[in-house]
Image (spheres, grey):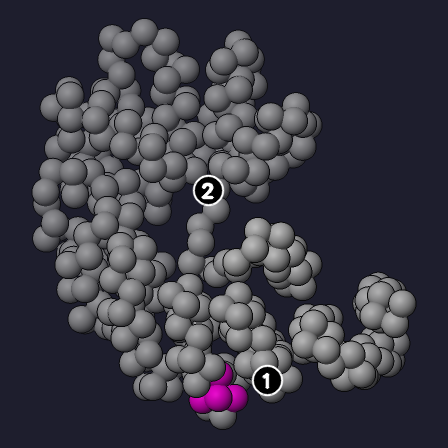
Amino acid sequence: MDEDVRNTGAVLLERRWRLPLVSVLDRQPPGLYPQRLLDEGRLDVLRAEVRHEPYARLYLARYCAEHGLLDELRELADAGLGLPRLDAVLAGALAGQEDVWITAALLKIGLYAQDPDIRDELVELLRSRDLLGRAVTVLAAPGDTWREWALRAHLLLAQGRIEEVHAMALEDRAAPADQMVAQIFAEHDMLDELRRLAERDISRHARQLALTLERLGHVDEAVAVVRARVDAGEAHVFRLLIDLLVADGRADEAVALLAVGAVRAVPPGEPEDTLRLAGQKVAHLLDVQGRQEDAIDVLRAYADAPAELADLLAERGRVDEALQVLDDAIAVARENFKGGAVESLSEQRRGLVG
């Protein structure tokens, strides 16, 4: 293909869909936003974020440690973290270490944020001092917080005590212990253990199992797991199945699923949003694959995306149809007092006419 044609096609796709073809399977590092604030020197915004964002607290704490702002670091470490047993674990692990207070503060804040790198750092620190077993005992004390409870599970896994972690999944707690354990197995790429947990209650663990399977390259099995739940009437995983199929480029299967979803696989109370978003994702995939006519059919049947539909129609030489789509959408936007949408669609219309 000619390079200019390829580049033009890429520009058209980017303009039409506004965003690249991604799915909820793509994970954004939780520290990305705090790091950007630091890079831009926006400490005031970062400080405002620490009240409700644990990762913001961790990044600000690191900044404070590096720049000698120890009073602020102390406030960050003491501001209601609620990890009393962890203090005892850190005190034992850091005995005799230089800068013990700063190190303990950063570890505590990072573990509260459930940062995997800091958790691994603590595991290796405890292992080097032969303190893993003692830490597990301390963290098992009654009344432990969820973060300490989860850290205990990670420490048990570091010792190979897998059956004890499975036993934790059966604990009667205020929050779902089995789902927490499933998440921990997923974080450690322990696929067999996650499958074993899912065998006990596949409905509760289908999502976590499927996401882990997909991440580890077992896409067909992930699709099979979720498809079975959709076929069983569990409509809440319909969107996940669409995402899996789209991420794997399986457009025809995704189109077939849309037809089923329109009838019976959409959660009550949100059918329009579910099908609209799913339809847009599938149409986007078809467009990327060069199947514009199929993408048009999907947009017409399932997605309320007039701007994208008009673009596709116009590029296929069906300008009159594109103008009609935009006129209808502009009328609806006016009825719903959506001035921004009216302006955007009207500008697109003028571009087609001019």
- Residue at the location (27% across, 28% down)? 122
Answer yes or no: do the residues labelled 2 and 1 have beta carbons within 8 Å?
no
Which residue in the structure is indicated by mark 1? Answer: 297
Q: Earlier in the sequence, mark 2 or mark 1?
A: 2
Residue 259 magenta-drawn? yes
Amino acid marked by disc 1: Asp
Query: Which of labels 2 and 1 is toward the front?
Result: 1
The residue type indicated by label 2 comes to Pro
> Helix, strand or loop at disc 1?
helix
Foreground pick, 134 / 190:
190
Residue at 24% x, 69% y is 221
Asked if 279 appears above or below 26 in the picture, the reply is below
Residue drawn at 59 percent across, 84 percent down: 297
User: Does the magenta run of residues contain 320?
Assistant: no
Give the x, y percent position of residue 222. Answer: 29, 68
Residue 183 numbered mark, or none = none
Q: Nearer the viewer, residue 293 or 32?
A: 293
Per the rendering, the mark at residue 29 is 2
Q: Which residues are drawn in magenta?
A: 258-262
